[in-house]
Image (tube, grey):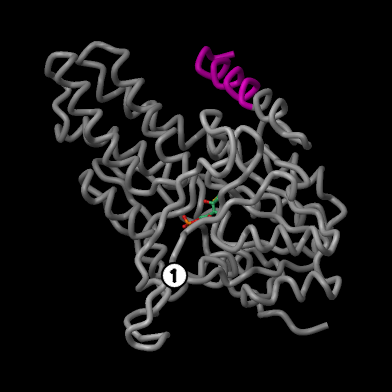
C-alpha cells in the first residue's frame, strides 16, 4: 500500500463563519491551504462579495453567512429598523434579494436569508434587530446539530465502507458543524471502519485538494488526492466501497445539484456497482422544484478555468464553459442522508416526510420542549 502524508500537529479548528461583535468573521477559504487568514465582514456589500468570491463557501456555510448578513444589516442601521412596517419590509426585501442572488444554486442561502427576513417582520420595531439576530444564530446552531445527526445516521447506513471517495469540500469549512458527507467520514473513522479517503481535486477551484485534504490530514484520516479524471479508474480497480457527496439543492424527486463533476462520479459509481450517497440537511431540499432540470445552475467566470492565481493554463484566446454545479438524476442515487432520516428511493414521499420531521423538531426546540 502506498504511503500517506504524515499527520501534522493538530490545530484547533476555527469556525468557518461566526459572529464577532459587530461583524461576521469568516476563514478566507481562497487562501487555503497556504494561510489561515480570517476576514471581517462589516456590510452587506462585504457579505455579498465574500460569498460570490468563495471566500466563504459550501451551501450551509453561505446560508449562515447570508443570515448573519441580513441580521447585521438591521443591527448596523444599513436597513433602518425604526421605520414604518411597509418601508422596513421593502428595504429588507431589497437586501435579502441581494444576498440570495450572490450564489443562485445553493438553496440554503435563500432559505436562511428568508428565515431571518420572516423573523424580523413578525415583531414590533424595537425587537426587529434582536429577532433577526436570534433567527440567524438559530440557523447556524441548527446546522451544527444537523451535521451531528447526519454523521450518525450516515455512518449507520454506509457502515460497511472502508474506502470512500468524495468530491469538493463538505466538511467543517462548508458548514457550521462537522460537515455533511465529510461529517459521515469523520464518524466512520471514529467507529474504526475507515481506512482511506480518496478525494477528487475538484477543478477548477480545487476545493477537494486545498480544503478537504487539509481537513482530513488535520483529523488524522488517511487521504489521497486524485485528479477528477482518475475517479472512474479508481472505481474500476475496486478501490472505492462508497461515494459520499454533499448537495447544493435537491429537487422534490431527489435530483441533486452539487459541485460540477458529481454527475460523472454517479455515472461511474453506477457502472461499477459502487453505492452513491448524497448527504445534505433538509435546508438543502427545495420542495418548490419538481425535477433537476428546473434548478438554476450558476455559471462562473471563464478565468477560473483558464488561469490559476494569475498564471495562464490554456492557450491565450481560448474560451471556457464554467458551470459551478451539475445535476445527478435521482435514479443514480443510492440514498439521501438527512438529519431527519435516511431517505431511500423513490425519494419524493420520503423527502417530504424528512422536511416535516425536521420542521416539527425545530418548532419543539423553539418552544423549549
Ligand atoms: O462552489 P462551492 O465550493 O460552494 O461548492 C460546494 C459544494 O458543491 C458542496 O458539495 C455543497 O455545497 C455541499 S457542502 C456541505
Residue 279 horizontal/vertical position (percent)? 66, 46
Give the image quarter of residue 20: top left
Question: Seen in the image, is 83 located left or right of residue 1?
Answer: left
Give the image quarter of residue 177: top right
Q: Main secondary structure of the magenta part?
A: helix
Residue drawn where x is 37% and y is 44% of the image: 65
Number of residues whose C-alpha sits closer than 10 Å to that of mark 1, classed few (under 14), some (14–19) or many (20 or more): some
Is residue 182 placed above or below 87 in the rendered structure? below
Towards the viewer: 141 or 156 = 156
Residue 243 horizontal/vertical position (percent)? 74, 58
Question: Seen in the image, is 160 located left or right of residue 331?
Answer: right
Towards the viewer: 243 or 256 = 256
Q: Secondary structure at mark 1?
A: loop
Residue drawn where x is 29% and y is 32% of the image: 71
Residue drawn where x is 77% and y is 74% of the image: 234
First to last magenta residue range: 355-369
Is residue 258 placed above or below 219 in the rendered structure? above
Is residue 119 placed above or below 24 in the rendered structure? above
Residue 116 horizontal/vertical position (percent)? 35, 27
Amino acid at each position: 500500500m502506498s504511503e500517506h502524508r504524515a499527520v501534522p500537529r493538530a490545530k484547533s479548528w476555527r469556525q468557518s463563519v461566526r459572529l464577532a461583535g459587530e461583524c461576521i468573521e469568516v476563514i478566507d477559504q481562497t487562501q487555503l491551504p497556504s494561510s489561515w487568514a480570517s476576514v471581517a465582514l462589516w456590510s452587506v456589500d462585504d457579505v455579498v462579495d465574500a460569498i460570490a468570491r468563495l471566500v466563504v463557501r459550501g451551501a450551509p456555510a453561505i446560508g449562515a453567512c447570508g443570515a448573519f448578513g441580513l441580521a447585521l444589516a438591521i443591527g448596523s442601521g444599513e436597513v433602518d429598523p425604526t421605520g414604518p412596517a411597509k418601508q422596513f419590509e421593502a428595504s429588507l426585501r431589497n437586501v435579502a434579494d441581494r444576498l440570495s442572488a450572490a450564489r443562485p444554486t445553493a438553496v440554503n442561502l435563500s432559505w436562511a436569508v428568508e428565515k431571518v427576513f420572516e423573523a424580523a417582520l413578525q415583531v414590533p420595531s424595537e425587537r426587529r434587530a434582536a429577532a433577526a439576530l436570534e433567527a440567524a444564530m438559530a440557523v447556524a446552531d441548527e446546522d451544527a446539530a444537523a451535521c451531528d445527526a447526519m454523521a450518525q445516521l450516515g455512518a449507520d447506513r454506509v457502515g460497511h465502507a472502508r474506502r470512500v471517495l468524495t468530491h469538493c469540500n463538505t466538511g467543517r469549512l462548508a458548514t457550521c458543524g462537522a460537515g455533511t458527507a465529510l461529517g459521515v467520514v469523520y464518524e466512520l473513522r471514529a467507529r474504526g471502519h475507515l481506512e482511506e479517503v480518496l478525494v477528487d481535486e475538484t477543478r477548477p477551484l480545487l476545493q477537494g485538494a486545498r480544503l478537504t485534504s487539509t481537513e482530513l490530514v488535520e483529523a488524522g484520516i488517511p487521504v489521497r488526492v486524485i485528479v477528477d479524471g482518475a475517479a472512474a479508474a479508481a472505481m474500476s480497480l475496486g478501490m472505492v466501497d462508497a461515494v459520499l457527496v454533499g448537495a447544493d439543492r435537491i429537487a422534490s424527486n431527489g435530483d441533486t445539484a452539487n459541485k460540477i463533476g458529481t454527475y460523472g462520479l454517479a455515472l461511474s459509481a453506477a457502472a461499477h456497482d459502487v453505492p452513491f450517497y448524497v448527504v445534505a440537511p433538509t435546508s438543502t431540499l427545495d420542495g418548490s422544484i419538481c425535477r433537476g432540470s428546473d434548478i438554476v445552475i450558476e455559471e462562473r467566470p471563464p478565468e477560473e478555468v483558464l488561469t490559476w492565481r494569475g498564471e495562464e493554463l490554456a492557450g491565450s484566446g481560448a474560451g471556457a464553459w464554467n458551470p459551478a454545479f451539475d445535476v445527478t438524476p435521482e435514479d443514480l442515487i443510492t440514498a439521501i442522508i438527512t438529519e431527519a432520516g435516511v431517505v431511500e428511493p423513490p425519494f419524493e414521499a420520503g423527502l417530504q416526510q424528512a422536511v416535516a420531521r425536521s420542521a416539527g423538531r425545530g418548532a419543539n426546540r423553539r418552544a423549549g420542549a
